[in-house]
Image: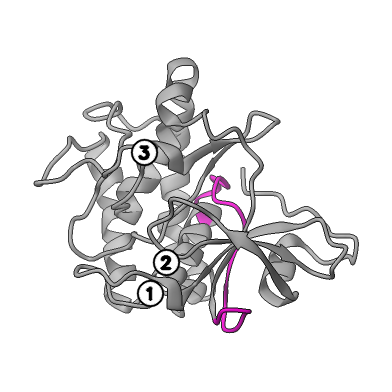
Protein backbone atom coordinates (compact mmCIF):
# COMPACT_ATOMS: atom_id res chain seq x y z
CA UNK A 1 0.00 0.00 0.00
CA UNK A 2 1.24 3.54 -0.63
CA UNK A 3 2.74 5.40 2.28
CA UNK A 4 0.07 7.24 4.23
CA UNK A 5 1.08 10.84 4.82
CA UNK A 6 0.15 11.88 8.34
CA UNK A 7 -1.42 15.36 8.59
CA UNK A 8 0.58 17.83 10.66
CA UNK A 9 -0.83 20.10 13.33
CA UNK A 10 -0.84 22.89 10.72
CA UNK A 11 -2.99 20.79 8.39
CA UNK A 12 -0.16 20.19 5.93
CA UNK A 13 0.94 16.67 5.02
CA UNK A 14 4.43 15.40 5.78
CA UNK A 15 5.42 15.73 2.14
CA UNK A 16 4.20 19.32 1.94
CA UNK A 17 6.15 20.19 5.08
CA UNK A 18 9.26 18.52 3.68
CA UNK A 19 8.88 20.58 0.52
CA UNK A 20 8.17 23.97 2.09
CA UNK A 21 8.66 24.22 5.88
CA UNK A 22 11.72 25.70 7.61
CA UNK A 23 14.59 23.34 8.36
CA UNK A 24 16.52 23.45 11.64
CA UNK A 25 19.67 21.34 11.74
CA UNK A 26 19.94 19.45 15.03
CA UNK A 27 23.16 17.52 14.51
CA UNK A 28 25.44 15.54 12.22
CA UNK A 29 24.76 11.81 12.02
CA UNK A 30 27.85 9.63 12.53
CA UNK A 31 29.17 6.94 10.18
CA UNK A 32 27.55 8.32 7.01
CA UNK A 33 29.73 8.46 3.89
CA UNK A 34 28.19 11.82 2.94
CA UNK A 35 27.21 14.68 5.23
CA UNK A 36 23.88 13.66 6.75
CA UNK A 37 22.01 15.63 9.38
CA UNK A 38 19.08 15.13 11.71
CA UNK A 39 16.78 18.11 11.34
CA UNK A 40 13.54 19.51 12.70
CA UNK A 41 11.00 20.48 10.06
CA UNK A 42 8.52 23.27 10.70
CA UNK A 43 8.27 25.75 13.54
CA UNK A 44 10.58 25.54 16.60
CA UNK A 45 7.97 23.56 18.57
CA UNK A 46 7.45 21.02 15.77
CA UNK A 47 8.00 17.38 16.61
CA UNK A 48 8.59 16.34 13.00
CA UNK A 49 12.11 15.08 12.39
CA UNK A 50 13.79 14.48 9.07
CA UNK A 51 17.05 13.36 7.51
CA UNK A 52 18.68 16.24 5.65
CA UNK A 53 21.34 15.47 3.02
CA UNK A 54 22.68 18.70 1.49
CA UNK A 55 24.06 18.34 -2.01
CA UNK A 56 27.22 20.22 -1.07
CA UNK A 57 28.03 17.41 1.37
CA UNK A 58 28.04 14.68 -1.28
CA UNK A 59 31.33 12.88 -1.72
CA UNK A 60 32.38 12.83 -5.40
CA UNK A 61 32.00 9.40 -7.04
CA UNK A 62 33.49 8.21 -10.31
CA UNK A 63 30.34 6.40 -11.46
CA UNK A 64 27.57 8.84 -10.46
CA UNK A 65 27.40 12.46 -11.63
CA UNK A 66 28.35 14.77 -8.78
CA UNK A 67 25.49 16.61 -7.14
CA UNK A 68 22.76 14.16 -8.21
CA UNK A 69 22.37 11.90 -5.15
CA UNK A 70 19.73 14.04 -3.44
CA UNK A 71 17.54 13.95 -6.55
CA UNK A 72 17.91 10.16 -6.68
CA UNK A 73 16.66 9.93 -3.09
CA UNK A 74 13.51 11.81 -4.10
CA UNK A 75 13.11 9.72 -7.25
CA UNK A 76 13.25 6.51 -5.20
CA UNK A 77 10.30 7.75 -3.15
CA UNK A 78 8.28 8.43 -6.32
CA UNK A 79 8.98 4.93 -7.66
CA UNK A 80 8.00 3.28 -4.37
CA UNK A 81 4.74 5.22 -4.38
CA UNK A 82 3.99 4.56 -8.06
CA UNK A 83 4.33 0.81 -7.50
CA UNK A 84 2.19 0.97 -4.36
CA UNK A 85 4.96 -0.33 -2.10
CA UNK A 86 5.11 2.74 0.12
CA UNK A 87 8.22 1.69 2.01
CA UNK A 88 10.38 4.70 1.18
CA UNK A 89 9.63 7.46 3.71
CA UNK A 90 8.24 10.70 2.24
CA UNK A 91 11.17 12.45 0.56
CA UNK A 92 11.47 15.86 -1.06
CA UNK A 93 14.18 17.65 -3.01
CA UNK A 94 14.76 21.12 -1.61
CA UNK A 95 16.40 23.90 -3.59
CA UNK A 96 17.45 25.65 -0.37
CA UNK A 97 18.23 24.85 3.23
CA UNK A 98 20.55 25.79 6.12
CA UNK A 99 23.43 24.12 4.26
CA UNK A 100 22.05 24.54 0.77
CA UNK A 101 19.70 22.45 -1.32
CA UNK A 102 19.42 18.71 -0.90
CA UNK A 103 17.08 15.89 0.03
CA UNK A 104 14.83 15.90 3.08
CA UNK A 105 13.26 12.63 4.22
CA UNK A 106 10.93 11.87 7.11
CA UNK A 107 12.85 10.32 9.97
CA UNK A 108 11.82 6.78 10.95
CA UNK A 109 12.27 5.93 14.61
CA UNK A 110 13.77 2.45 14.78
CA UNK A 111 16.10 0.09 16.62
CA UNK A 112 19.40 0.19 14.67
CA UNK A 113 20.20 -3.36 15.82
CA UNK A 114 17.23 -4.67 13.83
CA UNK A 115 18.71 -4.62 10.33
CA UNK A 116 18.07 -6.91 7.37
CA UNK A 117 20.29 -9.77 8.52
CA UNK A 118 18.28 -9.98 11.75
CA UNK A 119 14.84 -9.28 10.33
CA UNK A 120 15.08 -11.78 7.47
CA UNK A 121 15.13 -14.66 9.94
CA UNK A 122 11.47 -14.14 10.82
CA UNK A 123 10.01 -12.22 7.87
CA UNK A 124 11.97 -12.95 4.72
CA UNK A 125 8.89 -12.99 2.49
CA UNK A 126 8.20 -9.37 3.45
CA UNK A 127 11.38 -8.38 1.65
CA UNK A 128 10.41 -9.57 -1.82
CA UNK A 129 9.15 -6.09 -2.69
CA UNK A 130 12.51 -4.66 -1.58
CA UNK A 131 14.31 -7.12 -3.87
CA UNK A 132 12.16 -6.06 -6.82
CA UNK A 133 12.59 -2.37 -6.01
CA UNK A 134 16.37 -2.77 -5.90
CA UNK A 135 16.40 -4.53 -9.28
CA UNK A 136 14.32 -1.93 -11.12
CA UNK A 137 16.01 1.09 -9.49
CA UNK A 138 19.44 -0.52 -9.99
CA UNK A 139 20.26 0.07 -6.33
CA UNK A 140 24.02 0.08 -5.89
CA UNK A 141 23.97 0.33 -2.09
CA UNK A 142 21.37 -1.87 -0.35
CA UNK A 143 23.20 -2.45 2.90
CA UNK A 144 21.51 -4.42 5.70
CA UNK A 145 21.30 -1.21 7.74
CA UNK A 146 19.34 0.48 4.97
CA UNK A 147 16.28 -1.53 6.02
CA UNK A 148 14.46 -0.29 9.12
CA UNK A 149 11.59 -1.58 11.24
CA UNK A 150 9.56 0.98 13.13
CA UNK A 151 7.81 0.51 16.47
CA UNK A 152 4.67 -0.76 14.73
CA UNK A 153 6.63 -3.41 12.83
CA UNK A 154 6.45 -1.64 9.48
CA UNK A 155 9.47 -2.04 7.22
CA UNK A 156 11.12 0.93 5.54
CA UNK A 157 13.92 1.32 2.99
CA UNK A 158 16.28 4.29 3.18
CA UNK A 159 19.52 5.62 1.66
CA UNK A 160 18.75 5.48 -2.04
CA UNK A 161 21.24 8.01 -3.37
CA UNK A 162 23.07 5.39 -5.45
CA UNK A 163 20.22 4.38 -7.72
CA UNK A 164 19.00 4.72 -11.32
CA UNK A 165 22.40 4.42 -13.02
CA UNK A 166 22.04 3.41 -16.66
CA UNK A 167 24.87 0.88 -16.24
CA UNK A 168 24.36 -2.29 -14.20
CA UNK A 169 25.27 -1.38 -10.62
CA UNK A 170 23.06 -3.71 -8.55
CA UNK A 171 24.76 -4.24 -5.20
CA UNK A 172 22.53 -5.57 -2.45
CA UNK A 173 22.47 -7.92 0.53
CA UNK A 174 19.01 -9.19 -0.48
CA UNK A 175 19.94 -12.09 -2.77
CA UNK A 176 17.73 -14.74 -1.16
CA UNK A 177 15.20 -14.32 -3.98
CA UNK A 178 17.67 -15.08 -6.79
CA UNK A 179 16.09 -17.46 -9.33
CA UNK A 180 12.80 -17.42 -7.42
CA UNK A 181 9.61 -16.57 -9.35
CA UNK A 182 8.23 -13.06 -8.91
CA UNK A 183 5.19 -13.35 -6.65
CA UNK A 184 1.73 -12.28 -7.77
CA UNK A 185 1.59 -9.27 -5.42
CA UNK A 186 4.94 -7.94 -6.57
CA UNK A 187 4.05 -8.62 -10.20
CA UNK A 188 0.98 -6.44 -9.76
CA UNK A 189 3.13 -3.68 -8.27
CA UNK A 190 5.56 -3.89 -11.18
CA UNK A 191 2.69 -3.69 -13.65
CA UNK A 192 1.41 -0.55 -11.89
CA UNK A 193 4.88 0.94 -12.01
CA UNK A 194 5.33 0.08 -15.67
CA UNK A 195 2.00 1.64 -16.58
CA UNK A 196 2.77 4.81 -14.60
CA UNK A 197 6.06 5.20 -16.45
CA UNK A 198 4.15 5.35 -19.72
CA UNK A 199 1.89 8.16 -18.45
CA UNK A 200 3.44 11.55 -19.12
CA UNK A 201 1.06 13.16 -16.63
CA UNK A 202 1.79 10.65 -13.85
CA UNK A 203 4.92 9.98 -11.77
CA UNK A 204 7.03 10.18 -14.92
CA UNK A 205 6.59 13.96 -14.91
CA UNK A 206 8.01 14.11 -11.39
CA UNK A 207 10.88 11.80 -12.31
CA UNK A 208 11.68 14.00 -15.32
CA UNK A 209 12.92 16.80 -13.06
CA UNK A 210 15.00 14.40 -10.95
CA UNK A 211 16.55 11.99 -13.47
CA UNK A 212 17.80 12.11 -17.04
CA UNK A 213 15.71 10.71 -19.89
CA UNK A 214 18.24 7.87 -20.27
CA UNK A 215 17.86 6.99 -16.59
CA UNK A 216 14.07 6.95 -16.83
CA UNK A 217 14.30 4.80 -19.96
CA UNK A 218 16.60 2.37 -18.12
CA UNK A 219 14.16 2.23 -15.19
CA UNK A 220 11.33 1.47 -17.59
CA UNK A 221 13.36 -1.22 -19.35
CA UNK A 222 14.41 -2.92 -16.10
CA UNK A 223 10.80 -3.00 -14.93
CA UNK A 224 9.67 -4.60 -18.19
CA UNK A 225 12.59 -7.06 -18.11
CA UNK A 226 11.82 -8.28 -14.59
CA UNK A 227 8.17 -8.78 -15.55
CA UNK A 228 9.13 -10.63 -18.71
CA UNK A 229 11.73 -12.82 -17.01
CA UNK A 230 9.39 -13.66 -14.15
CA UNK A 231 12.28 -14.57 -11.86
CA UNK A 232 14.80 -12.57 -9.84
CA UNK A 233 18.36 -12.29 -11.17
CA UNK A 234 21.39 -13.99 -9.71
CA UNK A 235 24.32 -12.00 -8.30
CA UNK A 236 26.45 -10.78 -11.18
CA UNK A 237 29.30 -8.45 -12.02
CA UNK A 238 32.46 -7.90 -10.03
CA UNK A 239 30.74 -6.47 -6.94
CA UNK A 240 27.22 -7.81 -6.32
CA UNK A 241 27.40 -6.90 -2.61
CA UNK A 242 27.80 -3.45 -1.04
CA UNK A 243 30.55 -2.65 1.43
CA UNK A 244 30.28 -2.56 4.33
CA UNK A 245 27.47 -5.09 4.41
CA UNK A 246 25.67 -3.39 7.27
In terms of sequence position, does the residue under pointer 3 or pointer 2 come before the other? Answer: 2
Image quadrant assignment for residue 95 = bottom right
How many numbered discs? 3
Residue identifier under label 2: 72
| Image vertical order of residue 124 relative to residue 110, above or below | above
Q: Residue at x 78, y 53 (%)?
A: 6
Span shown in magenta: 82-100
Residue 63 position within the rendered picture, expressed as x and y whole percent measured from the top left: 20, 67
The reply to whether dot 1 and dot 2 touch (C-beta < 8 Å) is yes
> Which mark is drawn over residue 131?
3
Residue 46 spot, x, y in % from top left: 84, 61
Q: Main secondary structure of the magenta part?
A: loop
Query: How far separated are the C-alphas under marks 1 and 2?
Result: 6 Å
Q: Which residue is painted at 62% across and 34% down in the image?
A: 154
Residue 231: image x %, image y %?
25, 34
Q: Are marks 3 and 1 in contact (CB under 8 Å)?
A: no
Give coordinates of residue 90: x percent, y percent. Answer: 62, 58
Colour scheme: one colour
Give the label on residue 68, or none.
1
Name the side, left or right, on which 42 lies relative to 216. right
Amino acid sequence: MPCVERPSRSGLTELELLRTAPIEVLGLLPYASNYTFLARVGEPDSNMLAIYKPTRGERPLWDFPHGTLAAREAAAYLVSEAAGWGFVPPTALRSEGPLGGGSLQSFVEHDPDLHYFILRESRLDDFEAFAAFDVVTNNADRKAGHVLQDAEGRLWGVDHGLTFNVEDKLRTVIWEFADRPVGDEVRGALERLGASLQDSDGPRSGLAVLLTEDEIAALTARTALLLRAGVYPQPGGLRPYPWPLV
